[in-house]
Amino acid sequence: MFKLKLPTDPRWANIAEGNLSEILTDHAWCEQKAATNAITLITMLPEYPEIVTELLVIAQEELEHFQMVHEIIKKRGYELGRPRKDDYVNDLFKFIIQGSREDLIVDKMLFAAMIEARSCERFKVLTENIKDEELKFFYRDLMISEANHYTAFIGYARQLGDPEKVNRRWEEWLEYEAGVIRSYGKKETIHG
């Protein structure tokens, strides 16, 4: 999926299902951070009204996902809890090129695409491996949305930069992420 180099071990779903309160809280905050990231990208691209318009839709969808997860948390009698640090995302952030404005913006798009790709893949693992029927259905729907966001971010990167250069850089991101994800998959968090 998305050419990810290292798939998630399906046993991660058992870890996640073993503490649904924690995975749902972590997931909620991931959605909030995704909305914030889309808004941050908007501030970097005011001269691209079409991309801004599309990023606004993504930000709204991510906020809707946050609300949906929050509703599940409340319905199940869990507490939202404080935002969680996402070490995986922080590790990916270190790979962003701090060069020219164009390189920075393209890399931030690829950074967002990578997170969406891995999140989508994790939602697929949950859909295929957990027993909770409500969450199976929920994560299947979100998997489709995350795939659309991944496609959008890759598309923006190709629109804003040289498509061949972007494709080469995406391959570098895939290699880097494979090294990063090796350290994860042992905690009840979306990327953990």
Image (cartoon, rainbow, N blue to C red):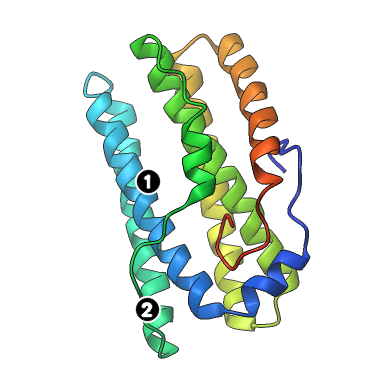
Relative placement, left or right, of 6 versus 24 is right
Give the x, y percent position of residue 3: 73, 35
Asked whether residue 143 is in view, the answer is yes
Name the residue that disc number 1 marks: 58
Compare residues 175 and 65 and report the one nearer the observer: 175
Q: Nearer the viewer, mark 2 or mark 1?
A: 2
Figure quadrant of residue 127: bottom right
Q: Residue at x 43, y 28 (%)?
A: 108
Is residue 79 toward the left or the right of residue 116 in the image?
left
Picture residue at 57% right of the left edge, 54% below the top: 191
Task: Report if the CB atoms under discs 2 and 1 are less than 8 Å apart.
Answer: no
Q: Position of residue 36 (x, y in %)?
A: 30, 46
Whether residue 152 appears in this view of the structure is no
Q: Is residue 131 above or below residue 103?
A: below
Q: Residue at x 57, y 52 (%)?
A: 119
Which residue occupies 28% across, 36% down?
40
Q: Secondary structure at mark 2?
A: helix
Amino acid identity at mark 1: Ile
Instruction: Look at the picture and state if 130 lies above or below 86.
Output: below
Left or right position of 117 against 87: right
Residue 136 position within the rendered picture, expressed as x and y whole percent measured from the top left? 63, 74
Q: Quadrant of the N terminus?
A: top right
Who is closer to the viewer here, 181 or 77?
181
| Label 2, label 1: how far apart the Cα atoms are | 20 Å
What is the x, y in percent for residue 111? 49, 33
Q: Which residue is mark 2?
A: 71
Q: Please name the amino acid that badge 2 sits on.
A: Glu
Please report whichever mark, 2 or 1, sits nearer to the chain's N-terminal start.
1
Residue 61 sits in quarter: bottom left
Categorize mark 2 by other alpha carbons within 10 Å: few (<14), some (14-19), many (20+): some
Relative to 139, 90 lies left or right: left
